[in-house]
Image: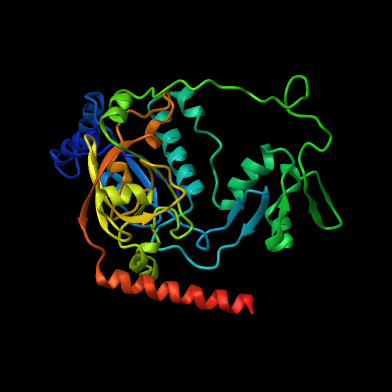
Amino acid sequence: MARTSVNVATASASHDAMSAVAYGDRAAMVNAIMGAIKSGGLFAVDVDIVPTKIGQACHVWLPAATSGEMNLTSMNGERRMRLTERYMDPPGQAMPDCLIAARIANHMERVLREQGKTQAADQFKGFEWKTEEDAFMDGYHGHEKGGEFVTYARLRDMGTNGFQEPAVDFKDGKIVGTKRLYTDGKFSSKDGKAAFMETQWRGLQAEGKEAEKNKWPFLINNGRTNHVWQNAYLDQQNDFVMDRWPYPFIEMNPQDMAELSVKSGDLVEVYNDNGSTQAIVYPTSTAKRKQTFMLFAYPTGVQGNVVSPGVNEFIIPNYKQTWAGIRKIADAPEGRQAFDAQVSGVFRRLRKRTTR
């Protein structure tokens, strides 16, 4: 799955421009879009596997295939590469990201050649991929260190164990991987030694961040949790997850909770000058005072609503440093309390079984 970040405010300018053009007038549509972009608007494209709010804010939605609907080569944190083979058809015209990219490249090359822009068109050559394996062979197999030893057929034979990158040989019908890196003590530096770089803290570089920090009492850090897969794009259809977390949680120090007169499971509003969102209070004794951690990108409470727009590739991303106020909206619902008690009972019984 690939996603494109969208600034809805600037994207709406292109939406309005497109809506003003009569259907079927391709040239007028292109001119309207380009005019909106030159005026500061965005033309946003989303490649996604399920309907999302990001997709709704975009102008073009390209349906993608996900694991199981396509052949997927993936690597985990221990450098273990495996092949997950397709076992079902993707919905409709959905296709893997690599083939979507290839189709775009093919189209760009054709259009640019028709315009006589040969040099620009040449940048899009070489994407005649028909399958995921074509992309793999053209990319990883042809360019990655040790890639010459790796093919779909060999990965298929390696099964779920796969191999640890980088591959160094193919022997006795198996890809020979690398259990541990740098055993020879040589690193990819000029002198072959490991380099530990010291970087000085450059402060809050995003515009307005220092003022935000001084104005609002709580740091609103954010990230993922094992309870929810990514941003819950599939868990939205999972009753167990959505019953457990009807809203995202925000971990807070119990002393901060006492000062705000909130208790576990209460619904609170997180707000600042950037916007507001909502979350369920989750007490965490290890959380430092005035520092919170909120589940990010959850559909019923988007932490990004309180993030400033001062983030780009030229600035240290200060989106993790967002400050806001917190206030109570409502008590924890009775249904939520009963569900928490039920879940706690299950875990108590499991612990008893494991200690016998």
- Location of residue 9 in the rendering, given as x and y in whole percent from the top left corner: 22, 36
Question: Of 175 and 200, which appears nearest the observer?
Answer: 200
The reply to whether residue 62 is in sight is no
How many marks can you see? Answer: 0
Q: Which image quadrant for residue 318?
A: top left
- Location of residue 170 in the rendering, given as x and y in whole percent from the top left corner: 82, 50
- Location of residue 118 in the rendering, given as x and y in whole percent from the top left corner: 47, 24
Q: Residue at x 42, y 42 (%)?
A: 288
Q: Residue at x 46, y 20 (%)?
A: 202
Q: Residue at x 19, y 39 (%)?
A: 18
Quadrant (top left, top right, bottom left, bottom right) of the C terminus? bottom right
The vertical placement of 281 against 19, above or below, is below
Q: Residue 66 vs residue 11: left or right?
A: right
Q: Residue 35 vs residue 264: left or right?
A: left
Q: Residue furthest right?
A: 172
Q: How is the image coloured?
A: rainbow
Question: Of 226 and 84, which appears nearest the observer?
Answer: 226
Q: Residue at x 27, y 59 (%)?
A: 266
- Location of residue 339 in the rendering, given as x and y in whole percent from the top left corner: 35, 73
The vertical placement of 354 against 276, above or below, is below
Q: Residue 84 vs residue 321: left or right?
A: right
Question: Of 2 and 26, which appears nearest the observer?
Answer: 2
The reply to whether residue 17 is in sight is yes
